[in-house]
Amino acid sequence: MDKPRLLIVDDDENIQLAMKWAFAQEFEILLACNRQEAIEIFRREQPPLVTLDLGLPPAARGVEEGFLTLASILEQDPFVKVIIISGQSEKENALTAIGQGAYDFFCKPVQVEEVSVILRRALRVHQLESEHRKLQAARPQDSFEELIGTSPQMQQVFATIEKVAATEAPVLILGESGAGKELVARALHGRSLRKAGPFVAINCSAIPDTLLESELFGYEKGAYTGAHTQRKGRIEMAEGGTLFLDEIADLPPLLQVKLLRFLQEHTIEHIGGRKEIAINARVIAATNRDIGKAIRDGSFREDLYYRLGVVKVKVPPLRDREGDIALLAMSFVRKYAEENKKKILGFTKKALTALVHHKFPGNVRELENRIRRAVIMAQSSKITNEDLELEEPEEPEKTTLKEAREKTDRELILRVLTENSFNVAQSAADLGISRPTLYELMEKLGIKK
């Protein structure tokens, strides 16, 4: 397999050679010592990674050449990951570089191990973005609607859609609020034989019970006060297409009976009407509730569940979809950056870390809303965790192997001593060591009787 290319832009030959030696095993190294050379090499080789010194000739003591090089490279490829490695250590230079689209910033002298970690991480982000763009380009626009994901959980959802979309079987979609249940329903419709027909959606929990029956089944003129004309219901509107009943577990008991009759006989009657109307529509339902619990407590009919759930699709919560957060986030960035006419290239490292570590109780809907707001609020080409209104996750406390062992030993010895009311002889026996050894450990670990 070919090594990924890394372009090192620095006017110091010693630094060039040192970095080439440090990274040659992982990357195919390209070298440039000024702006013109860097731009020519980048245009020809298109490397995914660049390290860039801001101080380049003919003005090596300043930063102007470096920033011009950064702008030219990003103009050619907005997705390239540029890591600034510079002797110009002023904080404002770092902030400006990140704001103009750099992936990260290091001050000279650098620790090779730290740069290596960042390069690997930047390459992984670049690969994920590239894979997503290829998937988008290769996939028909109506394939899975706006469903995006490379995680095994979402691949299972896609596989199920492929298997059942062309059938007439009713489908029950299960998943948390905001996980994308309606998108799954639209994907099923879009790949079915009914895709030329209407897709009619109704949220059973969003309409008062007193109005829901007429919304679903329609009514005749004069059926009740205010019914001045005949009106079709959502079921009838779905003729030849797909009816999507969202939050089906919130359907009142009386309407559950009427819906069950429709599923069995494929006919309905308007409110106030006596004529049976034949309906040819596929039914897809969804709920975020525990449907089994609803059946056990009597709020949902078991026979209706079996009618609706011939095929069940479980949509995973976003927190369980490994790797999908970054893909979805970039998709939403492109969508809302175009909508708001803003040039947003992506996220700062801290913002991406905050996104990946956030639990997203509101799932994909929450992610989309955060990205939409962040695009509007962003003042640079990279979205920050402040734009996302997310706190940077705390770094795990660093500890040595010796410290970890001592902590474990101390906790175990304290527990055994406490269980034996600090009887050293009994505790030593339980621990399988001698009394003198236990006394030595207690003194070493600061445990007092």
Image (cartoon, rainbow, N blue to C red):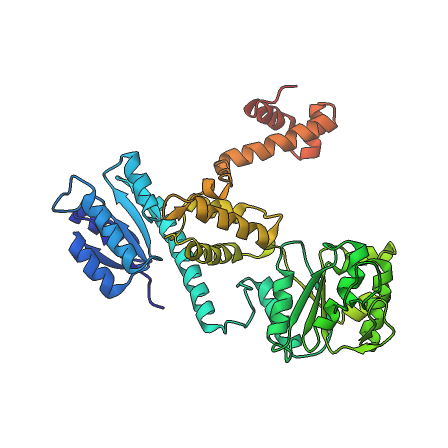
| Residue 141 screen position, x and y as percent | 50, 71
Residue lying furthest left: 58
| Residue 138 seen | yes
Q: Is 312 located above or below residue 330 in the figure?
A: below
Q: In the picture provided, is 229 more to the left or to the right than 10?
A: right
Q: Nearer the viewer, residue 163 or 215?
A: 215
User: Which residue occupies 57% across, 57% down?
Assistant: 321
| Residue 260 screen position, x and y as percent | 83, 69
Q: Nearer the viewer, residue 321 or 399?
A: 321
Residue lying furthest front: 228
User: Which residue occupies 20% across, 49% down?
Assistant: 10
User: Which residue occupies 60% across, 33% down?
Assistant: 409
Q: Is 189 located above or below residue 128 in the figure?
A: below
When asked about the image quadrant of residue 258, the answer is bottom right
Q: Nearer the viewer, residue 271 or 202?
A: 271
Quadrant showing the C terminus: top right
